[in-house]
Image (tube, rainbow, N blue to C red):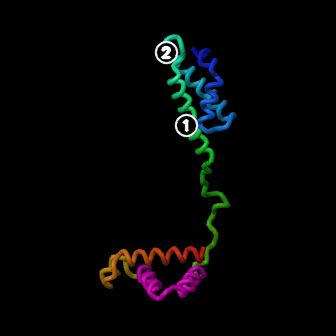
């Protein structure tokens, strides 16, 4: 039965190309499909449709091989992080100079933004500050979030 499947090799390659891969990748995927179908045939799978090959089954086998191929590509692109390497060791950070830089950047902000940021940063949660000042929670949250974003943009 595998010989009948192989007779339509060009059709399987074209089908795989339409899935969105290069010719070389299509050859690999079709080869993997042959291996998978051969293994299933050895286990007793019948893929005959009358005297012909069940094209739907072959299409499904190609699709599964294509998906497995793409998953393998994604895994290969992922670089495992080894925290013991010298390149990923944290550098010395001078927190005093970073804090001074934040303070300088905060001086450029509107007094209200600066005050909300400092109160939330140092003393209160947004909810507590909202209850004490009768300013809406969402207003305080948006102000705090905006100040943090602007600080990140200026410092980083």
Residue 32 is situated, as x and y percent measured from the top left of the image, at: 61, 28
Residue 108 is situated, as x and y percent measured from the top left of the image, at: 55, 86
Quadrant for the C terminus in the image:
bottom right
> What residue is drawn where x is 49% and y is 87%?
110
Q: Which is nearer the eye, 6 or 82?
A: 6
Residue 154 is situated, as x and y percent measured from the top left of the image, at: 59, 77
Q: Which is nearer the eye, 119 or 21?
A: 21
Residue bearing mark 2: 49
Which residue range is magenta in the image? 97-122
Task: Say which quarter of the image contains residue 21.
Answer: top right
Q: Which is nearer the eye, 29 or 42?
A: 29
Residue 100 falls within the magenta-colored stretch: yes
Of helix, strand and loop, which one carries label 2? Answer: strand
Residue bearing mark 1: 67
The answer to whether residue 44 is seen in the rendering is: no
Measured along the vertical axis of the image, is residue 83 above or below residue 73? below
Q: Label 1 vs label 2: CA separation? A: 25 Å
> What residue is drawn where x is 62% and y is 47%?
77
**Main structural element of the magenta stretch: helix, strand or loop?**
helix
Residue 14 is situated, as x and y percent measured from the top left of the image, at: 63, 30
Q: Which mark is residue 29?
A: none
> What residue is drawn where x is 51% and y is 73%?
149
| Sequence-first tag of 1 and 2 | 2
Measured along the vertical axis of the image, is residue 149 above or below residue 8? below
Task: Say which quarter of the image contains residue 99.
Answer: bottom right
The answer to whether residue 126 is seen in the rendering is: yes
Find the residue positioned furthest to the right. Answer: 24
């Amino acid at each position: 039965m595998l010989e009948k499947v192989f007779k339509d090799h060009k059709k399987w390659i074209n089908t795989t190309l339409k899935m969105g891969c290069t010719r070389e990748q299509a050859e690999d995927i079709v080869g993997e499909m042959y291996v998978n179908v051969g293994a299933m045939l050895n286990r007793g799978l019948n893929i005959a449709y009358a005297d012909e090959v069940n094209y739907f089954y072959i299409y499904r086998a190609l699709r599964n091989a294509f998906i497995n191929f793409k998953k393998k590509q994604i895994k290969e692109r992922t670089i495992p992080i080894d925290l013991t390497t010298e390149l990923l060791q944290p550098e010395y950070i001078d927190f005093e100079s970073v804090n001074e830089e934040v303070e300088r950047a905060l001086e450029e902000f509107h007094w209200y933004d600066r005050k909300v940021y400092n109160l939330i940063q140092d003393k209160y949660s947004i909810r507590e500050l909202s209850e004490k000042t009768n300013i809406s929670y969402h207003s305080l949250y948006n102000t705090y979030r905006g100040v943090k974003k602007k600080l990140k943009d200026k410092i980083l």
